[in-house]
Image: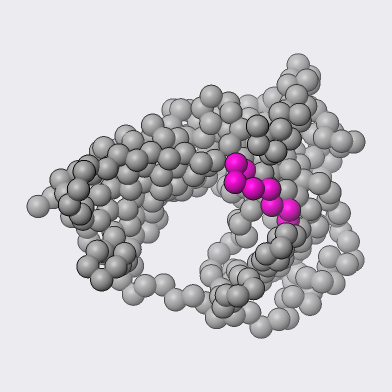
Amino acid sequence: MNKWLSVICLTGSLIISNQASASSTDADVLFKEMGTAAQNLSYEMSFMTLSPQNIVPVRYRHAILNGVPVSQMIQMDSSRREIVQNGNRISYFEPGFDAFSLNGEHIIDNLPTVIFADYQKIQPYYNFIDAGRTHIGDKPALVIRIISKDNSRFNYVLLIDEETKLPLRVDLLDNNNQTLEQFRVISTVLDSKNVQDSLKSLSNVNLPPLLLSPKNENPAFKWQVGMLPPGFEEVSRSTGKLNKDDIVETAMFSDGLFTFSVNVTKASKGPLLDQPLQNGRRTIYTMTQKQNVITIIGELPLPTSQLIASSIQFRE
């Protein structure tokens, strides 16, 4: 058994042990309080992300300075990758690569997207369930489950600090309740002067330039997706080159919690492709239809990826 799975198995009983103790806090309200706390409090959080591939230690700092969100995330392993947010600009720094910036509302790298999800947008497609109370170390926590209503998506279990409403642990589960990934907080410091001072310094740093988007941001495709799980919408589309002769057409979809892409290119001569791969939250499914290779990449269960790929319709 992988090291990360051993950690999850050893700690998994924390949720189950206190299921019978029902919390009076409504799950929907608690979910909104968590998002508000994560986006508005001043804090430093050290955590680990655990997946089948690796364990990544991270330090994250966040504050609102003069009405503007300022954040810093540093991977505490050998890569020392750093991400800085100042307002709606998020900048990436990594040894050996040119620094660049993107527009965005939050740093989501290594942080579960569920922390910043819009409740009103995702509520029609997920059940929010109060699962009682438990403890992580010496911290009392409230537990909520977020379950896909149509079984077409992954599910979450959230353990939220009863006092601060900040997340303490987030488990991403498949439809068989097997853990795919885990976010686990090691320590949290609130309203630290050191955090405030370090972020004030960052807010005055000149950030690298924005990475330019391709000019053709909405190309016309001769195909369309016939089946999408309810709530998923196309958020972007683009074209790119795999090599001199092969062009890939890509459409991105999101329901506000999970994202995936549909990628279509011309098939080369050879056997038909049908190559499923599930690795943590990441699914890759490839099939060939009418001399076109369709590849679904993203945060979906494999059966859902297969249904979407099979539903794609081509026009002459």
Compare residues 121 and 103 and report the one nearer the observer.
Answer: 103
- Where's residue 136, x and y in %? 82, 35
In the displayed structure, would residue 107 be above or below residue 272? below
Query: How many marks are shown on the rendered structure?
Result: 0
Which residue is located at x 38 percent, y 51 percent?
Answer: 261
Task: Say if the magenta span includes residue 52.
Answer: yes
> In the rendered view, how is the structure colored?
one colour
Q: Is residue 271 left or right of residue 281?
A: left
Which residue is located at x 41 percent, y 35 percent?
Answer: 302
Q: Is residue 231 left or right of residue 113?
A: left
Task: Confirm whether residue 122 shows in the render.
Answer: yes
Please identify the residue farthest to the front as the structure is shown. Answer: 270
Q: What residue range appears in magenta?
A: 51-58
Quadrant for the N terminus, please: top right
Q: Is residue 199 left or right of residue 278?
A: right
- Where's residue 112, x and y in %? 62, 47
In the displayed structure, would residue 80 be above or below residue 98? above
Which residue is located at x 87 percent, y 36 percent?
Answer: 137
Compare residues 75 and 63 and report the one nearer the observer.
Answer: 75
Which residue is located at x 47 percent, y 39 percent?
Answer: 278
- Where's residue 9, x and y in %? 71, 28
Task: Confirm whether residue 40 shows in the render.
Answer: no
Please identify the residue farthest to the top as the structure is shown. Answer: 20
Task: Say if the magenta span includes residue 261.
Answer: no
- Where's residue 257, x and y in %? 52, 45
